[in-house]
């Protein structure tokens, strides 16, 4: 029982880590887990939420605590179900949904007190500084790798980058580096949308057979790299997490679009892959806007984690890549 | 003077025939915005079918004059909003919070709050997929809640006038509606966003902090009140800027008036749900409950209608008469149905709705009148159905089950609705002492014999 599970980019991993437990982001997405999750929710729930439910319930002995957020509605409600079906202590934090930092700042203070109480340990300034240094060092290292992904030509695939980010999200980053660079001139695309789950690496590989993902805005990939803590204190954590490139669910979401636009230009992307999970309202409602505002071709990929449509998906990706090549 | 006949549910034809007995003076007596010239709304329901509310030919209505008033008034809302605009009133769109922002808006002169959200019933009343199809064209996913029709209504600009100001609540609310409000903003509507905190339950392992308890018995961190107070004060300032006025005494008066509505509705619900024979139909009762949100854009007239309904219901209860057989099976209904016909069908098949959880608990609770008004609104909103846990949401229903008042529960789900997807199984578990039927509300015109058979079998089993 050494894991502290969490489910949102606005939950500071430094605070989780200060408990002495291992932060473990709930990013499971697997068809079998998803089916098992349907014991607890309707079929029209998000497949990642269903997978995470099943994963935690099957592995509850591994989790000392669970940290939820008010991110998306289904994710928030997932913790309600976990409270009912496990004995794991659950804490749900109000994260920013509008431009109102007061709630978030107070919630982080509350959260720190709760975790101190829960673990019977005080998060002294020194502890907080150490955690910030440790996680900033990890993010710095990952940013270096991310730069190689964004290079011209791109030197590292997102499928490989995903493996590193998986380690980060499982709180188990080692000194592992990507040894085999894989430079390519494949069309450069940007990935955005629903979370890229731990089990979704094969999708990234499939996409990158014909394309190269050089940047992304997905939970499960590079989102934590947008967090840079300047002041080594709880206040510094609050500010950095609040000011990160905003989640699409934050209202109004213009800053999200401004950020993506800036990134697609900076990275020289010629297309966008919009990855959505079934019933993921937060991203599915954005698809038409994504197609309209960036002036880039968009390939929609929708998934329930099943493998049924993989050959069709492969054909669609190939056609998209061919179309991008003719435009280049 | 019109005399109510023996209570029963009747269709359009019968109402048209019966309407001949309503005198001219009575028709002229009932008017919205107290306007003699164009404010008259009493007409046989068939009138509204001619205007496009096609489902009325299938629905059955209570045959009282009070119910006739209710239907005339509610189906007239779209016209009323455009008339309000024509006559120089300001139109205030409240979205997502279901019940609190309109109380503030009503404190300003000639301001008419309404909920675009309520357009979700329109495709069903109209038996038309026009709004849903348009919403899809505008980019909403097919597998999302019927409330997406609201977006199409914003686009078509024919269902309500362009609001003078809009307040959109997000946070601990459903995602699909938050997305729809965002899409409305992108159409050029200027939104003022409010943040709703999650009503976190205190758990035994939580370190204590100052808590408060709502009327419904929900415990929440006291500081959440402060957030809401700040949000409501922002609404107040926006309204002041819009109207050039602002008198807090009028907010107190608005709270008092809304409480009058809420008390009347509570009385009507109590009378209806506890009588030996059901005195009033479930469909009308749903319309009555939702009137608490904003008084259907004329709260004074709505208050008067409610008084008349209460008198009618009280009279029937006293006489022991009603609209359903005395052996109708008592049911609780969880989550409002987008298709009103389902309420009729359940009653026709032998059910009787004696408890409801229509996701608007915040609009049913009485707002405190002896404390600072913004705090009172905040404390009232903390009773909201969807901002807390599922257990809290169905606690009252569970209590009624335990006391033997309810034989079964019907949950209506909307495909793709985030809280339906996540809550239904848990509600079934929480109400395990009673049979539960969870049904998906089909798209307009989609009620099948199969669905009716399921309801029939459920009620037979309960018998």
Image (cartoon, coloured by chain):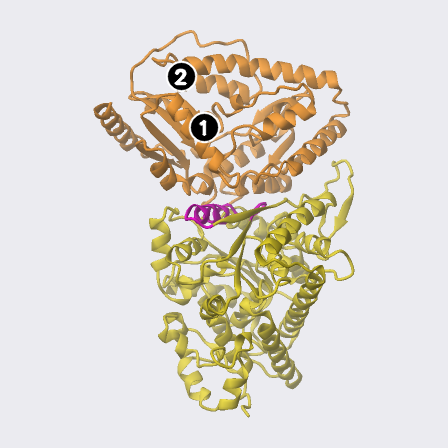
Chain colours: A orange, B yellow
Badge 2 sits on which subunit?
Answer: A
Badge 1 sits on which subunit?
Answer: A
Percent across and percent down for residue A75 are: 54, 39
Q: Quadrant of the N terminus of chain B?
A: bottom right
Q: Residue at x 57, y 52 (%)?
A: B428
Q: Mark 2 to mark 1: distance in Å?
A: 14 Å
Percent across and percent down for residue B276 are: 64, 77
Residue placed under numbered mark 2 in the picture: A150
The range drawn in magenta is B169-189
Q: Describe the element under mark 2 as helix, strand or loop.
A: helix
Residue B259 horizontal side relative to residue A151, left or right: right
Percent across and percent down for residue A4 are: 63, 27
Residue B186 magenta-drawn? yes
For residue A217, the mark is 1
* Image quarter of residue B92: bottom right
Q: Residues within 10 Å of mark 1 (few under 14, many from 20)?
A: many
Q: Is residue B181 above or below residue A172?
A: below
Examine the rendering and report whether any part of residue A33 can be seen. no
Q: Residues within 10 Å of mark 2 (few under 14, many from 20)?
A: many
Percent across and percent down for residue A149 are: 40, 16
Foreground pick, B189 / B441: B189
């Amino acid at each position: 029982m050494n894991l502290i599970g969490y489910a949102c980019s606005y939950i500071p991993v430094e605070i989780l880590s200060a408990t002495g437990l291992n932060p473990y982001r709930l990013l499971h997405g697997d068809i079998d887990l998803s089916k098992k999750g349907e014991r607890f929710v309707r079929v029209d729930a998000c497949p990642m939420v269903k997978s995470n439910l099943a994963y935690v319930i099957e592995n509850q002995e591994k989790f000392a605590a669970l940290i939820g957020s008010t991110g998306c509605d289904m994710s928030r409600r997932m913790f309600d179900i976990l409270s009912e079906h496990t004995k794991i202590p659950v804490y749900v934090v109000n994260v920013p949904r509008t431009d109102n930092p007061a709630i978030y700042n107070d919630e982080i203070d509350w959260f720190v007190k709760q975790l101190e109480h829960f673990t019977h340990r005080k998060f002294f300034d020194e502890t907080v500084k150490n955690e910030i240094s440790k996680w900033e060092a990890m993010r710095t290292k990952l940013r270096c790798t991310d730069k190689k992904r964004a290079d011209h030509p791109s030197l590292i695939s997102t499928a490989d980058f995903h493996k590193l980010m998986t380690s980060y999200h499982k709180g188990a980053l080692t000194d592992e580096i990507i040894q085999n660079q894989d430079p390519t001139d494949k069309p450069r695309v940007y990935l955005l949308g629903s979370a890229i789950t731990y089990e979704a690496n094969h999708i990234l590989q499939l996409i990158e057979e014909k394309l190269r993902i050089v940047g992304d805005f997905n939970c499960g990939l590079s989102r934590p790299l947008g967090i840079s803590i300047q002041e080594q204190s709880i206040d510094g954590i609050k500010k950095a997490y609040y000011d990160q490139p905003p989640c699409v669910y934050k209202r109004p979401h213009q800053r999200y679009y401004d950020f993506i636009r800036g990134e697609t230009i900076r990275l020289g992307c010629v297309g966008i892959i919009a990855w959505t999970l079934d019933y993921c309202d937060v991203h599915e409602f954005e698809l038409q806007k994504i197609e309209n505002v960036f002036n880039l071709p968009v390939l929609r990929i929708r998934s329930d984690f099943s493998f049924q449509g993989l050959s069709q998906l492969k054909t669609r990706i190939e056609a998209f890549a061919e179309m991008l090549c003719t435009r280049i | 003077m019109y005399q109510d006949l023996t209570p029963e549910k009747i269709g359009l034809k019968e109402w048209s025939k019966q309407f001949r007995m309503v005198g001219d003076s009575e028709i002229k007596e009932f008017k919205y915005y107290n306007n003699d010239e164009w404010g008259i709304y009493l007409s046989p329901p068939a009138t509204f079918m001619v205007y496009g509310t096609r489902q009325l030919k299938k629905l059955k209505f209570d045959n009282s004059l009070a119910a006739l008033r209710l239907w005339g008034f509610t189906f007239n809302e779209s016209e009323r909003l455009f008339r309000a605009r024509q006559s120089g009133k300001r139109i205030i769109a409240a979205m997502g919070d279901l019940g609190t922002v309109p109380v503030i808006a009503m404190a300003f002169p000639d301001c008419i709050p309404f909920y675009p959200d309520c357009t979700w019933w329109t495709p069903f009343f109209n038996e038309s997929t026009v709004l849903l199809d348009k919403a899809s064209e505008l980019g909403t996913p097919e597998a999302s809640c019927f409330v997406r029709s609201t977006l199409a209504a914003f686009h078509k600009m024919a269902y309500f006038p362009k609001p003078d100001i809009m307040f959109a609540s997000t946070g601990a609310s459903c995602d699909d509606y938050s997305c729809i409000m965002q899409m409305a903003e992108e159409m050029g509507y200027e939104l003022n966003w409010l943040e709703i905190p999650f009503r976190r339950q205190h758990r035994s392992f939580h370190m204590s902090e100052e808590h408060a308890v709502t009327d419904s018995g929900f415990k929440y961190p006291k500081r959440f009140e402060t957030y809401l107070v700040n949000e409501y004060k922002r609404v107040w300032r926006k309204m002041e800027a819009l109207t050039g006025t602002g008198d807090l005494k009028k907010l107190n008066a608005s709270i008092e008036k809304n409480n009058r509505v809420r008390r009347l509705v509570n009385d009507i619900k109590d009378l209806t749900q506890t009588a030996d024979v059901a005195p009033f139909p479930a469909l009308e009762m749903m319309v009555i409950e939702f009137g608490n949100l904003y008084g259907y854009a004329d709260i004074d007239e709505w208050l008067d209608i409610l008084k008349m309904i209460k008198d009618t219901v009280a009279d029937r209860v006293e006489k022991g008469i009603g609209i359903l057989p005395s052996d109708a099976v008592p049911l609780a209904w969880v989550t409002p149905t987008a298709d009103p016909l389902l309420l009729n069908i359940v009653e026709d098949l032998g059910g009787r709705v004696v408890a409801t959880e229509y996701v608007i608990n915040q609009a049913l609770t009485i707002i405190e009148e002896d404390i600072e008004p913004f705090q009172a609104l905040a404390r009232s909103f903390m009773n909201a159905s969807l901002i807390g846990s599922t257990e809290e949401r169905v606690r009252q229903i569970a209590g009624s089950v335990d006391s033997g008042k309810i034989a079964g529960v019907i949950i209506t789900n909307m495909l793709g609705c985030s809280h339906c997807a996540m809550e239904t199984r848990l509600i079934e578990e929480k109400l395990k002492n009673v049979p539960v039927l969870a049904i998906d509300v089909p798209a307009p015109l989609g009620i099948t014999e199969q669905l009716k058979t399921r309801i029939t079998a459920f009620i037979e089993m309960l018998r």
